[in-house]
Image (tube, rainbow, N blue to C red):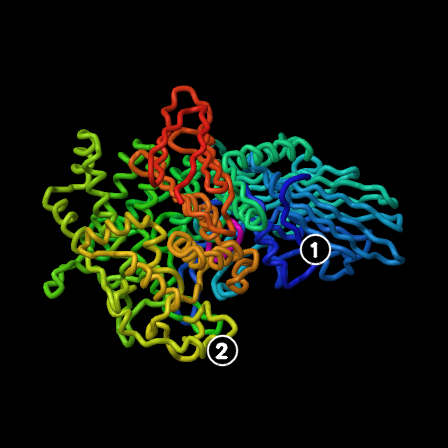
Amino acid sequence: MTGLTWEYEGYQPAQQRLRESLCTLGNGYLATRGALPECTADDVHYPGTYVAGCYNRLTSQVAGRRVENEDMVNLPNWLPLRFGPAGQDLLTPDTAPVAEHHQVLHLDPGVLERRTRYRLGAGGTLLVRQLCLVHMADPHLAALRTDFTADGFTGELDVEAALDGSVTNAGVARYRDLDGRHLTDVEAGSAQPGTAWLHCRTRTSDIGIGLASRLDAPAPVSDASEGRQAVQRLRLALTPGHTVTVDKTVALHTSHDPAISDPRCAALDRVAAAPAFDELLASHSTAWQQLWRRAELDVPGEPGRILRLHQFHVLQTLSPHTADLDVGVPARGLHGEAYRGHVFWDELFVLPYLNLHLPEVSRALLRYRHRRLDAALHAAHETGRRGALYPWQSGSDGREETQELHLNPRSGRWLADHSRLQRHVGSAVAYNVWQYCEASGDTDFLHTEGAEMFLQIARFWADSAVYDDHLGRHRIRGVVGPDEYHDAYPEASEPGLDDNAYTNVTAAWVLSRALELLARLPEPRRREVTEGTGLVPAELARWEEVSRTLHVPFHQGVISQFEGYGDLAELDWDGYRGRYEDIRRLDRILEAEGDTVNRYQASKQADVLMLGYLFSPAELRALFAQLGHRLDEETWTATVDYYLHRTTHGSTLSGLVHGWILARARRADAWGFVQEALRGDIADVQGGTTGEGIHLGAMAGTLDLVQRCLTGLETRDGLLWLDPVPLPELSSYGLSLRYQGHWGVHLRLLSGQLEAAVPASSGRAPIDIRLPDRVVRIGPGERVRMRLPD
């Protein structure tokens, strides 16, 4: 195999969870962690398998309370393939001596390879080589090829393959007080010789799950049902230097799949029709080649290698197959059980990348939100507000899935969780609608589902704003901003903060854009929307007023994170850094000491500075001017410096946002944060969290940093705006985009020049590229080189 690889040498038990996450294989429908097939779930290994959108809800007794949680379900494990000398114990790297171990993730073809040499008695060794794939062309198939080679001995090898339905959700230690037994009614059996099946369902969501496994080997296969497992066994004859191959092909269906009657029967039919491993590998590799061409990103050196890994994980979580599913963006991908597989605002960091490569996937992810608009309307009504209140954590049906308690592993205490007060997720949904439509030119979506969501989110913000006679401005009270450290004022009896700057400014943007959108709608559609939503001129006039009068607090010449932030105590930063090796989770440290981070000017992640991530400097200045404030360069620079010194970066998104802002504002300081964002998962900078699932938003955000931040790329007003800001460490790169129906628009930045090429396309209009000093029109089939202004 050729192309970029991600490799691990030697067997290290302490690193297995991290490696399993980073070696996960998926296709947008199905994903399986990169665990060793001979190992079962324990403190070292966690072989999880997940299907996008497959959730189940259970109730647990925690800290004397009944707590309800919905989880992305760990489905039956299809990987197991165990082996050992005939009549002896099966081999695992934890119980048998290992002479060598090598694991390679081949990124271009999407294949995981492992080579392990086990030491046997009398000087003999057994070399095990495996190739694993989760098929990118057929989303219901996965396959495992195992080559056994004897060295220094002749003998027989027992091989045991299984479909294991005894699994639970147990991949995150913090959740182990919660019920994780999601599967029930597990049945197993065999069909024709060499084919086994397993069927079960989820306990409350009643999703049927069917798996079928076909074993191809040069020996007879016996099938058996043992408890909650379908087991297949065979015995191989080994001679020195001769390789014997066993291929395991698996099909998986759920009752959510379209065009099937029964998932067990569908899985059996699909596995019977599946070709041999070599043909599966060829069609799988071809599908990946096509996907790589659509997402071309050419960045030299080590940053480019890491970005390729990030692309791999984004594309196998949200692939073209996702366009057919009713799913959102799981914050940890399909790579583990952290955050219970829920959908957060992380789509804010993912869709801008997808918009310019896989817009059909962006549209599907936005339709996930639209299908849950009724739930958002109901949630707003429950709080006494009109409009749509989208939940901080979403799952199967759009209700609020945020836990009411969370565990501080440092103190061992269960604490109240108020993060559901992060109302700003609605602004993220609206922002993504706007960005998608600008990049794709999809006015049909904007005028239909997009408009329905946008207007109801705007209505919620207008209805949440309360006029303050003393300030002469509208205020939004009782919320939590992107910085999750602060959820209440010191000594307050109720949670919530007033006038979070990020929340208020983005709410003003939503209201302004909603009015603009309404004016843009064709008159018949405008009438339908206003009639359907009950919009009247007086309400629209209030939207316009609130969009200009929302309060944005300031202190010491900088934007306040929320009203009163500047009155909080200063933390002894040097003291805490001296006492603790890592203060990223300062909230947990202080709580364990009997204190609270609510008392201090300390932020977990970018909050005010998120405004510089969402909006270009010109847009941000215009927004503040609309709100009656002059945001000059001096004020913004002072604001950036102020929060840089008070942020612990307890989220992988924080380094990304700071790197983005500094790349546009102060290049000399940007690279350290860009490196932090690039290393977030590969170095597990958050201290063990990557083993519970990768951070999809941060990965996609690093791709978008090259795609939009460093190029200064914006899609607005029918133009492709470009204003490159080359970092010394990342000054030459190329990428391809899909923009308003043009496939494969190519951009390359090199030595102060920008090259742009538009592929030949019959009937497509030229693209207008807006540079800082001019507009350049490029027609289909044309290539243009432009010297950039100094």
Q: On residue 9, which mark appears?
A: 1
Q: Position of residue 323 (x, y in %)?
A: 44, 36
Q: Reply above or below: 593 against 774.
A: below
- Amino acid carrying label 2: it is Gly
The numbered dot on residue 44 is none
> The C terminus is located in which quarter?
top left
Image coords of residue 442 (percent x, y): 33, 32
The quadrant in which residue 109 appears is: top right
Instruction: Label 1, secondary structure: give it.
Output: strand
The answer to whether residue 351 is seen in the rendering is: no
Give percent across and percent down for residue 269. Answer: 59, 32
**Label 2 belongs to which residue?**
578
Query: Real-space Cα distance between discs 1 and 2?
Result: 35 Å
**Kind of residue at badge 1:** Glu
Which residue is painted at 44% across and 64% down in the image?
650
Which residue is at the front of the view, 392 or 632?
632
Residue under the image location 43 percent in, 37 percent down = 787
Q: Which residues are magenta?
A: 334-341
Residue furthest top as drawn: 762
Neighbourhood count class around disc 2 (C-alpha, 10 Å): few under 14, some 14–19, many 20 upward: few
Disc 2 element: helix
Mark 1 against mark 2, which lies toward the viewer?
Answer: 2
- In the picture shown, does residue 761 fall above or below 683? above
In this orientation, does residue 735 appear?
Answer: yes
Asked if residue 234 lies left or right of residue 121, the reply is left
The crowd level at tag 1 (other Cα within 10 Å; few <14, some 14-19, many 20+) is: few
> Taking 539 as reference, is 166 left or right?
right
Tally the marks: 2
645 in magenta: no
